Image (cartoon, helix red, strand yellow):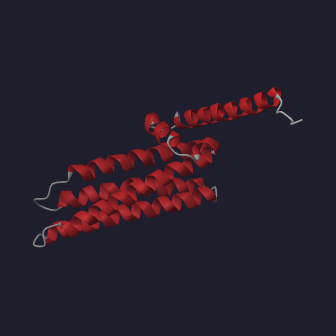
Amino acid sequence: MAKSTSPIFLLVILSSTLLSVKSNTTTIETTCKTTNNYHLCVSALKSDPRSPTADTKGLAAIMVDVGMKSATATATYIAGNHTAAATDDAVLKKVLKDCSDKYALAADSLRLTAQDLDDEAYDYAYMHVLAAQDYPNVCRNIFRRAKGLVYPREIRRREVSLKRICGVVSGILDRLAE
């Protein structure tokens, strides 16, 4: 005669799984309430498959990854425009190259933030995420100083996005440093 699984055993397993998911949703929401952009935080974290098992430090690492992807994608986007720019517009090419480099540096700063998180060096992590948040300002200022160039709307959109992501990371770091 085959053994059947006890209904009580199945109920216990199901209940613990549901409590774990609910507990993590609570962790995400509680963590995100400490940031300056609750909706971005919750949306980004709930869309990542690592979130259900992550603690607050893990949630910070996930948001840092989101920021690294954003900065890297923006550097690549700008570099692509640099390559496609008219060959006779040396000023535009230089501005685009400089901006691409700044976004690459933002991604590097976020990589350092991730290392700092691993080391639980939250002051350094905070310093690196603030640097990453500031590099887009440098790009905008480079455009501003170049006569006759207009800051492209798409780069502006990406700048705002990276700054928001970095702001969320800073809020989570504040929570970790408590």
Q: Nearer the viewer, residue 20 or 61?
A: 20
Q: Looking at this rendering, what residue extends furthest in the right direction? A: 1
Q: Looking at this rendering, what residue extends furthest in the front direction? A: 1
Looking at the image, which residue is at 63% across and 36% down?
A: 24
Q: Position of residue 3 (x, y in %)?
A: 87, 35
Q: On the image, which quarter does residue 148 sit in? A: bottom left
Q: Is residue 5 above or below residue 114?
A: above
**In the rendered image, which quarter contains the N terminus?**
top right
Side of 176 where 132 appears, left or right: left
Q: Position of residue 138 (x, y in %)?
A: 30, 59
Side of 33 where 80 appears, left or right: left
Q: On the image, which quarter does residue 84 sit in? A: bottom left
Q: Nearer the viewer, residue 129 or 17?
A: 17
Side of 94 where 132 appears, left or right: right
Q: How many marks?
A: 0
The reply to whether residue 152 is in sight is yes
The reply to whether residue 177 is in sight is no
**In the rendered image, which quarter contains the C terminus?**
top right
Looking at the image, which residue is at 47% across and 58% down?
A: 110
Q: Position of residue 80 (x, y in %)?
A: 26, 65
Q: Position of residue 103 (x, y in %)?
A: 35, 61
Q: On the image, which quarter does residue 131 sit in? A: bottom left
Q: Is residue 4 above or below residue 93?
A: above
Q: Is residue 105 above or below residue 69?
A: below
Looking at the image, which residue is at 31% across and 54% down?
A: 137
